[in-house]
Amino acid sequence: AALINFASAFALAAGAVIGVALDGLNGLYAGTAIAGLLSTVGAGLFLFRDVGVRWVMGRRGEGGLAEALRHFPASAGFYLTMVLSAGSLFLIRYLVLAHMGEAPAGFFQSGMSIALTAGAVLTPLINLYLIPILSRKAPTTDKVAACERFMMSLLPVMILAIIPILCFP
C-alpha cells in the first residue's frame, strides 16, 4: 500500500510539473488528470498481477466480481465520496481562480495543502490505533474513554507539528 501511495503521489507531482512546464495552469490540471488516470490503471494492474486480485469470478465461482458485488453499496458510497470531494475541491479552486485571481487561489491552495497534509498524517494514525480499539467488543463507555485518551495524546503532537507549518508556510 505504501509503494502504491508513493508511486501515485510521485506520478501526480510529475504530471503537475510537466503540465505546468508545457501549458501553465491549464497544463497543471491536464497533467494531474492524466497522471491520476495512469496511476489508477497502474495500481489496478499491480493489484491484479502481483497481489492476485481478480476482477472476474474464478473457476468455481468464488471471489472476483461476483463476490465484490455484495459489497457494492458500501464501495460505491466510498468512491462517490472520494470523487465528489476531489471534484468539489477542483470546482472551488476554479471558482476562486476565475473570480478572485491567482493570488487568492494560491492562498487557498496553500491552506488546503496544510489541511490535507494534516489529514494525511491523522488518517493512518486513526486507522492504526483508534479503529482497532473501537472495533472491539466492549462497553460504549470504555470506547468513549479510549477515544478521549487517544485524542488527548494526539493533541500535543498535532499542536507541535501544526504551529510551525502555520507560522512558516
Image: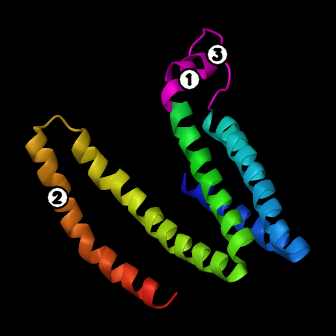
Q: Earlier in the sequence, mark 3 or mark 2?
A: 3
Instruction: Specify how the rendered protein is coloured.
Output: rainbow
Query: Which mark is drawn over residue 148?
Result: 2
- In the rendered image, which quarter is residue 83 located in? top right
- In the rendered image, which quarter is residue 156 located in? bottom left
Residue at 54% across, 43% down: 81
Residue at 33% across, 74% down: 158
Q: Which residue is mark 3?
A: 58
**In the shown orientation, is residue 148 left or right of residue 132?**
left
- In the rendered image, which quarter is residue 6 located in? bottom right
Vertically, is 93 above or below 107? above
Q: Earlier in the sequence, mark 1 or mark 3?
A: 3
**Is disc 1 surrounded by few (<14), some (14 to 19) or many (20+) residues within 10 Å?**
some
- Label 1 sits on what residue type? Ala
Vertically, is 4 above or below 71? below
Q: Which residue is mark 1?
A: 68
**In the shown orientation, is residue 72 left or right of residue 159?**
right
Q: Secondary structure at mark 3?
A: loop
**Magenta segment: does it hold 54?**
yes
- Label 2 sits on what residue type? Glu
Q: Earlier in the sequence, mark 1 or mark 2?
A: 1
**Magenta segment: does it hold 113?**
no
Report the magenta residues as a range: 53-74
- Label 3 sits on what residue type? Gly
Q: Mark 3 and mark 1 in contact (Cβ < 8 Å)?
A: no
